[in-house]
Amino acid sequence: MSTDDEVDGGGGDPGDDAGDAGGDIGGDGNQRPARYDRLERHPTPGGRNSLRHWTDAKSPVTVAINYLVVWLIRVSPSLRLKSWLLRRLGATVGSGVSWGLEATPDVFWPERISLGEDAIVGYDSVLLCHEFLQDEYRLGDVVVGDRAMLGAKVTVLPGVRIGEDAQVAANSLVADDVPPGATVAGVPAEPVERDEDERDGDKRDGDENES
């Protein structure tokens, strides 16, 4: 998956960072995302890329069934039906989850997705639990905390954890964990500092709600 290589900094054997723990410093001098420590790495045989061997990684029948269910999840207007179908695929879905139209769970390993209570996954977002590279494929759980919000067209990479009450701006690529309550945006997504007026406004709203 080229997107992951770009976030990595590119270049080199995909297995080069297999021993890197989260927080280690990569060869480019940048700190590795915490998700790398959680990824399961499965080397693939032969001289071709790992996607050529996908049938060894997952049953084609299972993937075909998953695809049909995912298609229903994408187009159904019923939030209740979406949550029910996601659970049938093996995903953990808390109460009150809102899954947007055209949003797509991982087709190969949807059972590795966990959605907290009242989480929002926006329109046309994608939650990936796998990545096929040249010499290996990687698997990782995607965890979205309670009341976390993903905007439209957000892509979340394998192994990422998004904390409670976190917010991810539209069109962002989430390649690292998002702390609870944080707001992130961009490709790759990085923390966004809100200005004083916004923070004061939130404080005033909170004070009014308590009164």
Image (spheres, rainbow, N blue to C red):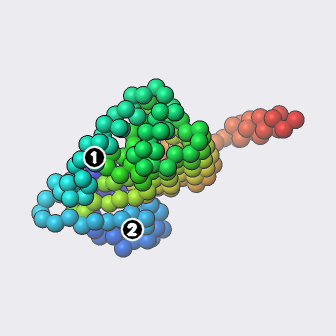
Q: Residue furthest top?
A: 77
**Residue at horizontal 81 percent and vertical 35 percent from the top:** 209
Q: Quadrant of the C terminus?
A: top right
**In the image: residue 139, left or right of residue 135:** right
Residue 128 at what x, y percent from top left?
A: 38, 49
Q: How many marks?
A: 2
Of residues 194 and 156, the one nearer the viewer is: 156
Task: Please rate how many residues cluster around mark 2, counting C-alpha atoms within 10 Å: few if below 14, some from 14 to 19, many from 20.
Answer: some
**Is 1 or 70 nearer to us in this picture?**
70
Depicted 125 relative to depicted 31: above or below: above
Q: Quadrant of residue 158?
A: bottom left
Q: Which residue is mark 2?
A: 26
Q: Quadrant of residue 138?
A: bottom left
Q: Earlier in the sequence, mark 1 or mark 2?
A: 2
State the image coordinates of residue 44 (x, y, percent, origin top left): 20, 64
Is label 1 in a helix, a strand or a loop?
A: helix
Residue 93 image position (x, y, % from top left): 52, 45
| Tag 1 residue | 63
Name the amino acid, label 1.
Val
Depth check, front residue: 5 or 53 = 53
Name the kind of residue labelled 2 in the image. Answer: Gly
Q: Is residue 194 left or right of residue 30?
A: right
Tell which residue pokes out farthest to the bottom in this image.
19
Nearer to the camera, 171 or 49:
49
Crowding near the residue tagged with mark 1, few <14, some 14–19, many ≥20 C-alpha atoms within 10 Å: some
Does any portion of residue 133 appear in the rendered image?
no
Whether residue 135 is visible, yes or no, is yes
Q: CA distance from mark 1 to mark 2?
A: 34 Å
Q: Residue furthest left?
A: 47
Could you say whether the residue bearing mark 2 is in a helix, strand or loop? Answer: loop
